[in-house]
Amino acid sequence: MTFFEIADLCAGYGTGQVLFDVSLDIERGEVVSLLGRNGAGKSTTMRCVAGAKPPYVQDGAIRLDGDDVTDLKTYERINRGIGYVPEERRVWPGLTISENIRMAINNADDPLSMDEVMGYFPRLRELGDKAARNLSGGEQQMLAIGRALASNPEIMLMDEPSEGLAPFIVRDVENIITTLNEEEGLTIFLVEQNVVMAMDVSDRHYFIDQGSIVDEMTPNELRASPDLRKKYLSV
Ligand SMILES: Nc1ncnc2c1ncn2[C@@H]1O[C@H](COP(=O)(O)OP(=O)(O)O)[C@@H](O)[C@H]1O
Ligand SMILES: [Mg+2]
């Protein structure tokens, strides 16, 4: 059985349709990235999986380990094992680092402990009492990842975690993705515009263009296809 599956998903905002029969699957333990230009429907796909609204699912299904999660509420999905690091890392700015993590721990049925979360982020542990709004972009990204991790997910969705970060910080993000995947067996569904970063960390890529999945390939196949990168990604 497929671990995670999006099957013929149609979704949109109001009456406008943005996703057209999007289907993809992810095996347990894989890192899979969804690539595509700005406006292609990447965040819409992730928000459908996380249960964030809008967008609204019009048709199709999302399944985790055989369970249909399409109609679950956001908090039910968190407890079902779907962690979500949204675009623009929406941490709670007025709360400290520890309070941000504590909030996620308190809201989960089967969370990690504060120590378990902080164990992955030594830098955040040092800064524990600092308000989130005073963190650098990279630190906020780590906090957003830590907060999603606190609920002890089986699959983690990450929407453009490298966005707006300096290259050496992007490497930190890559490292945490690889660590969580390799050491914890966490399955990761990644959206990225940074193709080089995505090729470094992913097992497979899907391409989305104008709301439809148009291709699927390995990083090696993508490295060998500069024409595809131009066609779907303009890089
Ligand atoms: N809140 C919204 N209301 C209406 N249309 C939206 C909304 N968010 C995104 N869209 C539209 O949905 C399409 C896909 O957007 P999105 O999924 O954010 O793309 P990506 O993440 O690939 O850049 C775009 O045409 C965008 O304008
Ligand atoms: Mg987006």
Image (spheres, helix red, strand yellow):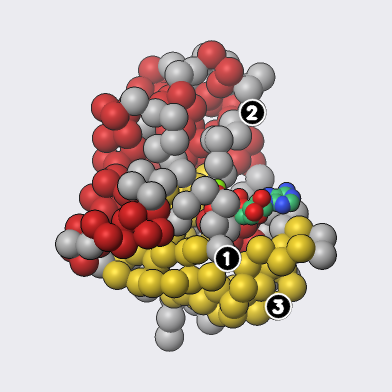
Residue bearing the label numbered 2: 92
Residue bearing the label numbered 3: 59
N-term mark: 3 or 2: 3
Please state which of residues 167 and 73 is positioned toward the viewer in this rendering. 167
Q: Residue 101: x, y in percent? A: 55, 34
Residue bearing the label numbered 1: 211
Residue 51 visible here: yes
- In three-dimensional space, the C-alpha distance between marks 3 and 1, rounded to whole angstroms, equals 14 Å
Indicate the quadrant where residue 184 lies. bottom left
Q: Secondary structure at mark 3?
A: strand
Q: Residue 161: x, y in percent? A: 44, 40
Residue 46 visible here: no
N-term mark: 2 or 1: 2
Against 66, is 33 above or below?
above
Against 227, is 2 above or below?
below
Q: Is mark 1 within 8 Å of ligand 1?
A: yes
Residue visible at 59% across and 77% down in the picture = 21
Q: Secondary structure at mark 1?
A: loop
Tell whether 234 sits left or right of 156.
Answer: left
